[in-house]
Image: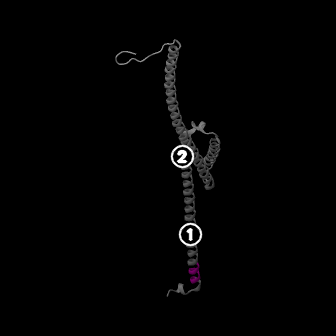
Amino acid sequence: MNDKMKNPKYLRWGILALATLLVIIIAAFILTTKSINDKAEEAALANEQLQLTNEQLQLANEYQALNVEFQQYENQSQLLANDSLVTKYAAAKSKVEKLLQELNSEKKKSAQHIKKLQDEIGTLKNILRHYVAQIDSLGKENAGLRAENAEIKQRNQQLSNRVATESKRNEILSERMTLAEKLNVTGVTLNALKKNGKI
């Protein structure tokens, strides 16, 4: 063996150098792992933000589609006896627009805001579904009433025709009665003739 290796002073320095090298390697490993974990966490947060932004866009598109559908029925709102559905829809629409504005102004998207937006859009869907069902129901009722009205007009026309026919008959009978009275007043009697022409 080498004399240097036998010397305890050199052995201590070797162990110390080896221990220092080991500490440096462990510290480097810990720092690298922490850096990788930090980057992974940042990537996960960025991915979550991207998903929330995507959900927000989908909800905004869904909201626009609901508005377009509602506008198709808006001119039929006068059919509704009470327009509370229109008022409810307008209130829910206002909430959705406010939430969309808040989300657009946020730098970090909030899952809680997205959930609220989903709930409000769900409310809009339910109101619109109820609104459309009510308008369809009223449309069917109106169609039934129109059919009933047409049937009543047809019956009235038939009754008018009967009345006109009966009036004409009455007029003819009245003329005949007047003629018969005149014949009776003059004292004219009619005798039937036999076949041979004698009375």
**Chief SS of the magenta region:** helix
User: Which residue is under mark 1?
Assistant: 28
Say whether disc 2 or disc 1 marks the residue closer to the N-terminus: 1
Q: Quadrant of the C terminus?
A: top left
Residue furthest top in the image: 186
For residue 90, above or below residue 16? above
Residue at mark 2 to residue at mark 1: CA–CA distance: 49 Å
Nearest the camera: 168 or 137? 168
- The image position of residue 84, as x and y in percent, is 65, 42
Residue range in magenta is 10-16
Q: Residues within 10 Å of mark 1 (few under 14, many from 20)?
A: few
| Disc 2: which residue | 61
Q: Quadrant of residue 18?
A: bottom right
Instruction: Please name the residue shown 56% across and 57% down the image.
Output: 48
- Mark 2 belongs to which amino acid? Asn
- Residue 188 at x, y = what percent? 48, 13
